[in-house]
């Protein structure tokens, strides 16, 4: 298991905030966190350039998706080389909101991860079960199928740049956080799957983040779960004090 080290806390702003508001939001977060904190922000694509121009060593840019091809006739799409050129370091892939809005998305995730890793960027791969599956007790089987489909063995370059985010769909944006035992169990399952399929040596280096209604009230408790290496934060990342408190809670534990 990856032992505690610098936590990865990623703000997923989704389709929120205007570009100029993004600048004040991120600068406000900077003011409230300890100097060593790494602030990873995945704003809408349209804000990346402006945030990159701040040239702030604490701010790391993330993107919320990418296309699997580098260039071509793909109207409205954005590729890894374009994002890399803007200074993006992390790309979120397989988010449940993308999967749910287009079921074909599921078939593209492997190639998207490949493209991100090929570009030398970090792929933040999301997996997680819907409520009915959790209630039926088949959540681990569901996660296993996602991992098998999306992370087929021997298909990725630079696999050490993979990050996994466990995001139970029923906890996203609902205010309902998964219980500590549920997080512990699923993270352990993901670690074991990685270890069986990619080897223990690699599994020991892949961070596993939790996402789903993380806020300043529950962050410390989640940060203490031994196999949680950080968090993917949606709603609470739009409030600078909330997000800063989440970051500070994780840094206190690590
Ligand atoms: C997310 O969408 O990745 C997420 C975790 O959202 P929230 O924190 O709002 O549940």
Image (tube, helix red, strand yellow):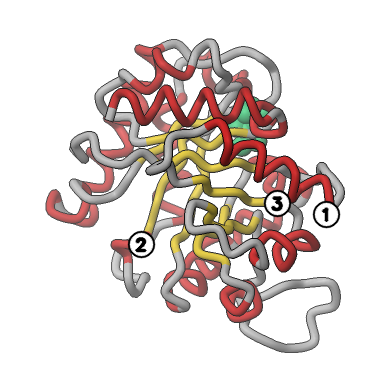
Q: Residue 95 falls in which quadrant of the image?
A: top right
Residue 161's tag is 2
In the current view of this chain or complex, which residue is farthest to the bottom?
72
Label 2 or label 3, whichever lies nearer to me, is: 3
Q: Residues within 10 Å of mark 1 (few under 14, many from 20)?
A: some
Residue 43's tag is 3
Residue 80 relative to residue 49: left or right: left
Dot 2 beta carbon under 8 Å from ligand 1: no
Q: CA distance from mark 1 to mark 3?
A: 9 Å
Q: Secondary structure at mark 3?
A: loop
Residue 132's tag is none
Quarter of the render that holds ligand 1 = top right
Q: Position of residue 134 (x, y in %)?
A: 52, 18
Do residues under tags 1 and 3 come within 8 Å of each other at their CB atoms?
Answer: no
Q: Secondary structure at mark 2?
A: helix
Dot 1 beta carbon under 8 Å from ligand 1: no
Q: Residue 188 falls in which quadrant of the image?
A: top left
Residue 19's tag is 1
Looking at the rendered image, the quarter that the C terminus falls into is top left
Q: Nearer the viewer, residue 123 or 149?
A: 123
Q: Position of residue 156 (x, y in %)?
A: 36, 70
């Amino acid at each position: 298991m990856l032992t505690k080290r610098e936590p990865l806390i990623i703000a997923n702003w989704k389709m929120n905030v205007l570009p100029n508001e993004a600048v004040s939001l991120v600068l406000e977060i900077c003011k409230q966190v300890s100097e060593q904190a790494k602030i990873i922000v995945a704003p809408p694509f349209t804000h990346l350039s402006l945030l990159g121009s701040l040239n702030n060593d604490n701010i790391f840019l993330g993107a919320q998706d990418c296309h699997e091809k580098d260039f071509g006739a793909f109207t409205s799409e954005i590729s890894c080389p374009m994002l890399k050129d803007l200074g993006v370091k992390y790309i979120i892939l397989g988010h449940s909101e993308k999967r749910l809005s287009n079921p074909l998305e599921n078939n593209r995730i492997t190639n998207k991860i490949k493209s991100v890793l090929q570009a030398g960027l970090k792929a933040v791969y999301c997996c997680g079960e819907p409520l009915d599956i959790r209630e039926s007790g088949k959540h681990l089987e569901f996660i296993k199928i996602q991992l098998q489909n999306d992370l087929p063995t021997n298909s990725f370059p630079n696999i050490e740049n993979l990050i996994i985010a466990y995001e139970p769909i029923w906890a996203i944006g609902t205010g309902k956080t998964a219980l500590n035992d549920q997080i512990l169990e699923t993270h352990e399952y993901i670690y074991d799957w990685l270890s069986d399929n990619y080897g223990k040596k690699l599994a020991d280096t892949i961070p596993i983040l939790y996402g789903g209604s993380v806020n300043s009230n529950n962050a410390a408790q989640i940060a203490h779960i031994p196999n949680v290496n950080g968090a993917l934060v949606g709603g609470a990342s739009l409030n600078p004090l909330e997000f800063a408190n989440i970051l500070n809670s994780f840094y206190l534990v690590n």
